């Protein structure tokens, strides 16, 4: 009771849970980590080549009074992911929640898109999610509980010119989510995807001005999403209140993909 009061007014409670979040040194992943930590979860997060921001994030998360550790790990590398997951289980014990959020873009029209552009985006966004799921699969099976939350995108539903690699990876993540939901449902493990629209982060700040304006104009709610919008949905999917939801894709996009 004391904890619930201490944690504030949120209806969700993650005290005593451990969440593994990929790509949480900044952006959406960091927003999810902060929200989960506010709700009482211990956080093990992965980043790639982002040590300085990861340290800042560790400090911010630790200030919330939970256990936190950052791991530098390329999710596209299965052996590295395996080693990191083993280290996390040694350090934290049971893992309850996996959020596959790490992602990159290499936007170009197909005419200009190289094989390397295509492979890099598929490897990090799609294979990375597969790798992390594979590494925690038996752990979740044995514990007979687990939550997997995959950060896809509305372009994985609708496609997007200039993003054939990224949209394909994000569509693949939706199929991965539904497959995992079917494979692990009998073990009380749920898998769901969030499809964000246009969210204000380093990734979208780096877009050309014209593309940013066009994206904003296409949003019925007439504002970009904030990382908190995605974090709140992730918190719901990780909570006990969402225990009967699996294989679902929730768009959080201000109506952009209606
Ligand atoms: P960001 O670029 O701000 O952060 C990306 C994070 O992923 C960083 O922590 C980085 O260290 C990590 N990362 C990158 N490559 C990695 C690798 N190989 N191994 C491990 N970690 C790696 O990105 P943002 O905007 O926060 O996006 C997060 C996720 O949300 C991505 O999957 C992105 O595709 C998705 N998304 C973002 C949208 C947006 O509007 N910002 C919209 C729809 C989806």
Image: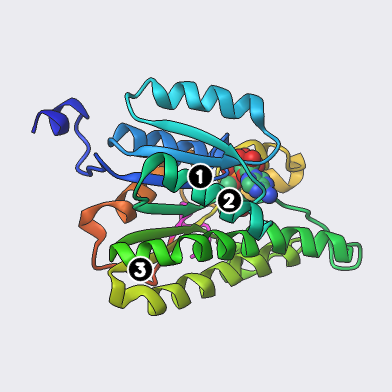
The tag earlier along the polypeptide, 1 or 3, is 1
Could you tell me how far apart the alpha carbons at marks 1 and 3 are, in whole angstroms?
A: 19 Å
Q: Are marks 2 and 1 in contact (CB under 8 Å)?
A: yes
Task: Tell me, yes or no, if residue 64 can be seen here.
Answer: yes
58 in relation to 21, above or below:
above
Tell me the element at label 1.
Answer: helix
Tell me the element at label 2.
Answer: helix
Image position, residue 9 (x, y; %): 19, 33
Residue occupying image coordinates x 19% and y 42%: 11
* Residue range highlighted in magenta: 251-258
Tell me the element at label 3.
Answer: helix
Could you tell me how far apart the alpha carbons at marks 2 and 1 are, in whole angstroms?
A: 6 Å
Task: Using residue 215 as the reference point, say whether residue 109 is left or right of it.
Answer: right
132 in relation to 93, above or below:
below
Task: Using residue 108 as the reference point, say whether residue 249 is left or right of it.
Answer: left
Residue 257 is a magenta residue = yes
Which of labels 3 and 2 is toward the front?
2
Is residue 5 or residue 197 the one in the foreground? 5
- Which residue was labeled with disc 2? 83
6 in relation to 89, above or below:
above
């Amino acid at each position: 009771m004391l904890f619930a009061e201490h944690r504030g007014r949120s209806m969700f409670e993650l005290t005593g849970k451990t969440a593994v979040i990929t790509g949480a040194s900044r952006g959406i992943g960091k927003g999810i980590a902060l929200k989960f930590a506010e709700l009482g979860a211990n956080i093990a997060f992965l980043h790639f080549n982002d040590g300085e921001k990861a340290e800042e994030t560790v400090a911010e998360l630790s200030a919330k009074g939970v256990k936190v550790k950052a791991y530098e790990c390329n999710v596209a590398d299965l052996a590295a992911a395996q080693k990191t997951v083993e280290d996390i289980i040694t350090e934290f014990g049971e893992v309850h929640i996996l959020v596959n959020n790490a992602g990159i873009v290499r936007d170009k029209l197909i005419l200009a898109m190289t094989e390397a552009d295509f492979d890099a985006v598929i490897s990090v966004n799609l294979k990375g999610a597969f790798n992390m799921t594979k590494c925690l699969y038996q752990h979740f099976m044995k514990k007979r509980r687990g939550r997997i939350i995959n950060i896809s995108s509305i372009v994985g539903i609708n496609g997007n010119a200039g993003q054939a690699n990224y949209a394909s990876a994000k569509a693949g993540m939706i199929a991965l989510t539904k497959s995992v939901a079917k494979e692990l449902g009998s073990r009380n493990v749920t898998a769901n995807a969030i499809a964000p629209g246009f969210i204000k982060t380093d990734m979208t700040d780096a877009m050309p001005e014209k593309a940013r304006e066009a994206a904003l104009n296409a949003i019925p709610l007439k504002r970009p999403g904030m990382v908190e919008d995605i974090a709140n949905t992730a918190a719901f999917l990780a909570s006990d209140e969402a225990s009967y939801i699996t294989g679902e894709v929730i768009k959080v996009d201000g109506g952009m993909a209606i």
